[in-house]
Amino acid sequence: MHKRREGFRPFEYLLFAGLTFVTFAVSVSLGSVRVPLPDTVTLIWNALWRLPLPETAVSPSIILAVRLPRVLSVALTGAALSLCGGAMQGLLRNPLADGSTLGVSSGASLGAVIAIAFGITMPSLPFAGTMVMAILFAFLSLIIILALAYRLDYSLSTNTIILIGVIYSMFVSSIMSFIITYASDRVRQITFWTMGSLNGSSYGNALILLGALLVFGGVILLHARELNAFAIGEDNARHIGINTRRVKLTVMISVSVLIGVSVSIGGTIGFVGLVTPHMVRMITGPNHKKLFPASLFGGAIFLMLADLLARMLLNPVELPLGVVTSFVGAIVFVFIFHRARKTGHA
């Protein structure tokens, strides 16, 4: 008998990649100034291969200097947050878990806000200070939440972890409000992080996101088999030779770094890691070897559509991206929670 293929098949990659590319092209084309889709694709293609830029009704700089780096950053952020959500759901064996519901995103935002308010920078790399603080606080938040949950409930039930995550998020929110009170000269910049937006993203931002996703996202993808074993319980995973402590630590560090990088660039963008993996799971099933690649594509598509909605809904006024994802995510979260309770998985 032939062994059943567990990972993505080539046609599945092509299907998801095609949907992602179409969403990407449409997102770059539409905005306050609409550019025909063929012109957009031609501009990007010619710029990529350094060919002469065609004459269009609008300046090529609108596409190449403004929208393209933004949509690239949005797609990579969505992919990273979705992958993190899928990893946390697999690690905790519950579809209600992700970086935002567990308070990790709030912790990363606190680190970024502290760096902004107190001007924490690094020599010759001013942006790195915000990023390092966001990553550090994301990881510390995850450790604090899991430690408190373990003290209250040795079984580390997901409901306990989520409850502590919500309480921790409220605590972090109060600290950020306190910091804003004494950093009035930087209120606008801090508000950017708390509401979430990728407006003004640069190619440098996209390159940082891509690097983090390749390294730490790759680490998560390599642990898909181990997380499949976690689905039948840590004890069973341990009995088949998996070092559960090492896997948990490795995945948590990778998740913390990806969330920290995403927050340092785009602010708090909630519910992407909750909504997308759950929706993708309905299509691919629970196998992480299929779920993780699909989550990457699905997260990119979801956040690009959310960003497009944020730009187009009240045009010319632009909504913060975090507002759109939170609105959609809150509705889906209630549906997921109700469905999970009904089936007895929460």
Image (cartoon, rainbow, N blue to C red):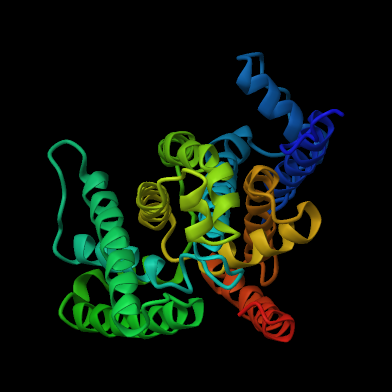
Q: Quick one: 60 or 319, which is closer to the camera?
A: 319
Where 89 sits versus 103, above or below?
A: above
Task: Please state the horizontal and vertical placement of residue 34, each as a whole percent of the image.
Answer: 74, 49
Task: Please state the horizontal and vertical placement of residue 177, each as a whole percent of the image.
Answer: 27, 83
| Residue at 29 percent of width and 84 percent of height | 171
In the rendered image, is residue 289 in sight?
yes
Where 172 sits versus 73, above or below?
A: below
Task: Please state the horizontal and vertical placement of residue 14, each as a whole percent of the image.
Answer: 80, 33
The single residue placed furthest to the front in the displayed view is: 239
Left or right: 28, with 208 as reference point:
right
| Residue at 67 percent of width and 67 percent of height | 315
Where 260 sits versus 188, above or below?
A: above
Which quarter of the image is occupied by the C terminus? bottom right
Q: Quick one: 290 or 60, which is closer to the camera?
A: 290
Q: Quick one: 238 or 138, which is closer to the camera?
A: 238
Left or right: 252, with 287 as reference point:
left
Q: Quick one: 262 or 24, which is closer to the camera?
A: 262
| Residue at 62 percent of width and 57 percent of height | 303
| Residue at 65 percent of width and 42 percent of height | 289
Quarter of image, res 46: top right
